[in-house]
Amino acid sequence: MRRVENLFLTFSILGSVIVFALLAPMAIIFFMTNPIQIGEALMDLEILNALLTTFTAAAMATFSALIFGTPLAYVLARKDFALKNLLESLMNVPLAIPHSVAGILVLLAYHSRSSIGEILSRIGIVVEDSFWGIVVAMLFVSAPIFISSARSGFSMVDETFEHVARTLGAGHFKTFFTVTLPLAFRSIVSGIIVTWARAVSEVGALLIVAPYPKSIALLVIERFEAFGLSAAIPITALLLLIGIIVVLTLNYISMR
């Protein structure tokens, strides 16, 4: 018993180092920021426009991941097929490459003079230096997170429930929407929140694909480079506060 207590004491001391390393910057930024400064940031039209652009684009990217990623996640969770492992690995590549590389990949594939970009431009979707470019870049770097979360949720649903529903006369689509999806709902919602948060935090890809209209992450960099650290602190504190709210919401959903 004594050895177990010593183990936890040792591990707690070691763990406190990383706790301090993570929490200290967050505490310092709030200590250095006057609440009035955050209020002033919320009244800055440039900041508000950047927030609106960022949150709207992130919402559209997340919605796209939900609509197209949910069916893919279900197939990956329920079916075995050739090259499935390779496909799953490739789906996670955007998470493993530098953000600037992700931006170059997106720009090369979807710029208006590329084969795919020409098709998109005909329906009004131009990637470079546009709102749609922000959406596409955000989708590229964040969709794998949603797919992984949704796939885990579907994998945890006992297939017996689906079989019972179908023996009672429910079709495949009805079974999915009335049985499978509700049982995997928590993982779906968690995936939505984390995907949206990841999209909001994107910087490197946006610098290459669509620096304009300006997202909030790029505005922080611009203020820092133009006016120094003091000008970037209020926006940083505001974004950190939003991030804390998102994480607390995610934890609440997980506990529920």
Image (cartoon, grey):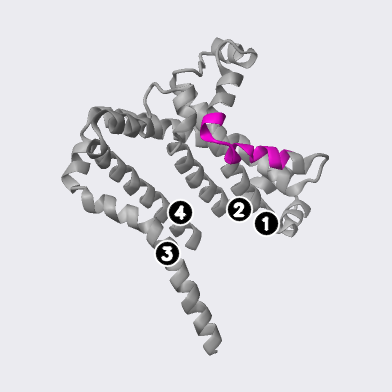
Q: Are marks 3 and 4 in contact (CB under 8 Å)?
A: no
How crowded is the residue under tag 1: few (<14 C-alpha within 10 Å), some, or many (20+)?
some
Residue position for label 3: 17
| Residue matched to label 1 | 157
Q: For the residues marked 3 and 2, what is the alpha-carbon distance in whole angstroms?
A: 36 Å
- Between 207 and 229, the one lying in front of the other is 229
| Residue 73 percent across, percent down from the top left | 66, 43
Within 10 Å of the Cα at label 2, are there few (<14), some (14-19), or many (20+) other Cα atoms?
some
Q: Quadrant of residue 68?
A: top right
Is residue 96 part of the magenta span, yes or no? yes
Mark-to-mark CA distance, 3 and 4? 25 Å
Residue placed under numbered mark 4 in the picture: 250
Q: Is residue 103 left or right of residue 161?
A: left
Does 126 appear in magenta?
A: no
**SS of the residue at dot 1?**
loop
Mark 4 and mark 1: Cα distance apart in space: 20 Å
Residue span colored magenta: 87-101
